[in-house]
Image (cartoon, rainbow, N blue to C red):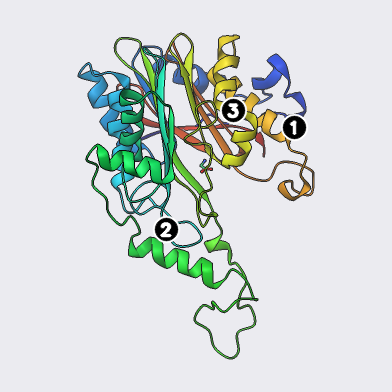
Amino acid sequence: MENINRRKFIKTTALSGAAVATSSILNLESLASAKEETAAKPIAISSGNGAKALEKAMEMIKEGKDAIDAVIAGVNIVEDDPNDMSVGYGGLPNEEGVVELDAAVMHGPSYRAGSVAGIRNIKNPSKVARVVMERTDHVLLVGEGALKFARAHGFAEENLLTDQAREVWLKWKENLSKEDDWLPPHTIEDKEIGQIFEKYLRHYGTIHMSALDMNGNLSCVTTTSGLSFKIPGRIGDSPIIGAGLYCDNEVGSAGSTGRGEANLLNCSSVMIVEWMRQGKSPEEACLLACKRVNERCREKRLQDDQGKFKHGVSFYAINKKGEHGGANMRSGGSYLIHDGTAVKRIESAYLFK
Ligand code: GLY
């Protein structure tokens, strides 16, 4: 996989309107070459855990398949992977140790979408989301209803909790509180029992993929096991059309990973598409979404000592011309694209260093 390093420093004080993507040390040469490489269709973009998914999706796109077929087949690889503990089979469970998955798909040409939320025992929620889109009069099915619907369509049920994920959940449970009876292995000398250790902190893993196919059509998918150790029934942004993903076949496609609550409050994906409609590049639009999340946050518990939003959110976008962009709240993030030649890792723009 090729790494494209676009060294970039976005002055947070200049982050308004058209100034959003200007940079004092923007590496224009590498930026230009990244854009050149992706000028020709087709293209697919994903979060950083999507290398194999992108390979699969691009293979199908080159065969002339519709982008919706390609993005779903791509993310199915990650849903099936027990070692990706943020998506599908092997995803980290809720606080009771039960895996609950969210997924949504959106098809540009038909302007239809489908999603499932809080579904248990089905390892490919993105496939069920597609059936919701194609064979119901609804857009979103949740929980038991989503599971019954999947059963009716012949989806196999299985225990999604792998031993690896159960061990991580158990360590979280054992370190959750000093005031309950769940303790990790310890000796009589240990003082820190009951602390939540850094490596067991909760996280929001997800995969998003958007693609532009050989016919110039856009589609996207987002699929996740959601926030690890969540309250049962908690739904994140991933299955919510407009929050965790959105595509408009005339404009572009976008999606998000990271703290779903922030994206639910800001409808970030539909905003990114609308900003692209107004002429912003995919990267500018993604940065505006980061800026919106930060500015709208009023809760101190979600801010660092400087009053900046302290959780991670990441955005990914492509437009109808095949241009791509991504942005994170903090520096150091990246996203993947497949431009028809190879998977490439691109450094994301960011709001804060
Ligand atoms: N973005 C994934 C989630 O919050 O569930």
Would residue 340 appear left or right of 345 to someone viewing this image?
left
Check disc 2 and report the residue beneath it. Answer: 98
Kindly state the secondary structure of the residue where label 2 is placed. loop
Sequence order check: which comes first, mark 1 or mark 3? 3
* Residue pictured at 31% horizontal, 30% vertical: 131
Q: Answer with the quarter of the image where residue 221 lies.
A: top left
Residue 192, located in which quarter of the rendered image? bottom right
Residue position for label 1: 295
The extreme left residue here reads: 63
Q: Could you tell me if the residues under marks 1 and 3 are in contact, i.e. CB atoms within 8 Å?
A: no
Mark sitting earlier along the chain (1/2)? 2
Q: Earlier in the sequence, mark 3 or mark 2?
A: 2
Q: Residue at x 48, y 62 (%)?
A: 96
Q: Which mark is residue 268?
A: 3
Q: Between marks 1 and 3, how big is the CA–CA gap?
A: 13 Å
Q: Position of residue 45 (x, y in %)?
A: 41, 27
- Nearer to us in this view, 280 or 252: 252
Q: What residue sits 60% from the left and 84% below the top?
A: 190
- Measuring from the top left, give residue 42's x and y in whole percent: 33, 16
Judge by depth and name the residue closer to the eye, 305 or 175: 175
Visible residue check, residue 48: no
Residue contact between numbered discs 3 and 2, judged by CB atoms under 8 Å: no
Q: Amino acid at mark 1?
A: Glu
